[in-house]
Amino acid sequence: MKKIIVSTLIFIQIISAVALAGGGLKYSISEIPDSLKKNANCVLRVSETTFHVYDDFKALNTVMYAVTLLNSKSLDDAEIRVFYDNNSSVNYLKFKIYNAIGEDITHSFKTLDVTDESATPEGTLYSDDRCKVVSPSFAQYPVTIEYSYEVKSKIVAYYPSWQPITSTNMSLQQASLTLITPKAQVPRIKEVYQMPKAMITSDAQNEVYLWKISNIAAIETEPYSPPYYELIPFLLLAPDRIKYEDYDYSFNSWDDLGKFRSYLIHGRDQLPPETVKKLEDLVKECKDKRSKIKKVYQYMQDRTRYVGVQVEIGGWQPIPADYVDKKGYGDCKGLVNYTKALLKSIGIESYYSIVKAGNNSAPLISDFPSEQFNHIILCMPDDRDTIWLECTSQRNAFGFLGSFTDNRDALIVNDSGGTLVKTIVYSAKDNSSLRKASVNIDNKGDASLKISTQNKALQSEAFEAIKYDSPENQRKQYVKRVGYSDCIINSLTYNLTGDFIPVGTEEVELFVPAFASRSGNRFFVPVIMPDRGLNIPRSSTQRVNPVVIRSTFSDCDSVTVTIPDGFDTEFIPDKQLIDSKFGKYMLSVEKLDKKLYCYRYFILFSGRYEAAEYPDFVAFLKKIAKSDQTKVVLTQKN
């Protein structure tokens, strides 16, 4: 069998060489170096982009790239979406498909075509954003798809970033970006993570910047890794001026970007007189500023819902506040602008703030002012602390941002400009999970359990998500999480309370057959609930990426076990203490009369560590996992 495979590869290489000499084949897999196949699901064979900016701030973006899919895991990388709106148009979008030896097999895909679709996400009411789409599927791999397209823009306020590698497990053979700008418009440039410096040439009218990168191996998905876009060459570009309608000013600082965003929202905070009167009546009994803000936030949540409304200027400009007031919906921009207007009507100043949201988003590159954001939140000073409001959720606790926008840079926009600040960071005390459980074991080893779990801050998000699910799904999810497949749930309830640091609670009463495993006259009693068990990442001595623990959190468990009649303790484990730079752990079990008192505490510290420290991190988690498997041994008396 091995001889046949080798012969086939040699045949492919011979055919490829002959055909290439005659110009007949392209993108044969034999031309991919082995180093680029390692850990790769796909290989970006070539990528050539030219972004041409003209004197009148119009632009032409021309792209050609080809990606070889080595297996079905890379199918998503075969799809293309070319976006446009009322300020832009797609001049063309073409594609060709090649097999493993480089033959053009496009004709075999007779039903595959370019479609034109709305670019709006689910929940978007209307938008002038559209996209040209090609979404292929393949029965055999490897296969290569080559795309070429061109987009003409009537107005360009910002330059696009360039990041040809778009996912983990994608390698790159060669890529280039050419930026052409008028000599009077000097671009600002930030080359990130081994991006080479540009080669610069010029002609009579333009400066031409050329970047080339090649032979970049695939980044393997590793547990606790940084976002992949922190680990690949990345280029940020920005103009030195922002021009839109009658706005034409320099762009060299975060303050400049704040001024432009302020221009886009100016005059969009008008409300009907009857709404202003309603708000004045709503807050007249409030004793302080914070209680007024909370009333307004709840008012907004109760009468609006999130619906995407993205028109003009790249979806950056919010719809007016009176429109949201009348219709009862808006996107993040519109709802923040509306809430800002509501607060203004009762004399409270707040600030439109732009942020890069997402649970796994790369950090803002703060020394390069540019459009790196994707979400809007609201900020207001308070005597006690800064208040942040997430305005797109009808369920969010007052003053709570959550994992979507916590602990990152945000640009606060006001009439005079913009200021970069940090959103709230939740501590281990905030991100805590406190559990109290009582376990009554009978003389068969079956047990009745009563468990109360209280999760705070980021840990409350798990309970928030399931609180609004059906009782049937709640029970299914609970059984799946704790692993008691044959348990009987007598009651299960969820609740969510609190402001700023929300508290999610889970109350459950259940019966678990064979909770204590039996061997002869002995019971082996677990002291920690199974859902506290850690997911241990695989060990690796060849770790490549740094270790990133995004958030600090702590768990504290107090479990009381009633020893069944006729049994006594034979073995109680010693106290366990594990101390590490990554966190701390403690487990203790004590007996008092007919009860066992089990206590567990675990804290994991946020941080960024070198790849060489990964084995130590895994070893730390394994020690904890082993300790969590500790059992008390009970013996039946004669």
Image (tube, rainbow, N blue to C red):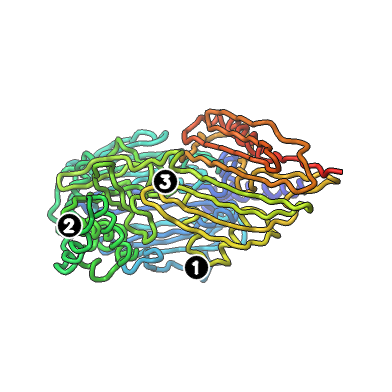
Label 1 element class: loop
Q: Which residue is mark 3?
A: 361
Q: Which residue appears at 52% of the width and 43% of the height? A: 171
Q: Which residue is mark 2?
A: 346
The type of residue carrying mark 2 is: Ile
Q: Position of residue 490 (x, y in %)?
A: 62, 63
Q: Which residue appears at 23% of the width and 70% of the height? A: 326
Residue closer to the observer: 300 or 131: 300
Side of 119 where 539 appears, left or right? right
Q: Which residue is mark 1?
A: 112
Residue 273 lies, with reference to residue 285, above or below; the image says: below
Mark 1 or 2, closer to the camera: 2
State the separation of the CA atoms marked 1 and 2: 57 Å
Label 3 element class: loop
Side of 549 where 237 appears, left or right? left
Mark 1 or 3, closer to the camera: 3
Q: Earlier in the sequence, mark 1 or mark 2?
A: 1
Please tell me how crowded label 2 is: few (under 14), some (14-19), or many (20+) other residues with Cα within 10 Å.
Answer: some
Q: Furthest-front residue in view?
A: 593
The type of residue carrying mark 3 is: Ser
State the separation of the CA atoms marked 1 and 3: 33 Å
The type of residue carrying mark 1 is: Leu
Contact (Cβ within 8 Å) of mark 1 with mark 2? no
Q: Which residue appears at 72% of the width and 40% of the height? A: 631
Residue 528 visible = yes
Mark 2 or 3, closer to the camera: 2
Q: Earlier in the sequence, mark 2 or mark 3?
A: 2
State the separation of the CA atoms marked 2 and 3: 36 Å
Q: Earlier in the sequence, mark 1 or mark 3?
A: 1
Side of 481 where 133 appears, left or right? left
Label 2 element class: loop
Side of 285 where 375 appears, left or right? right
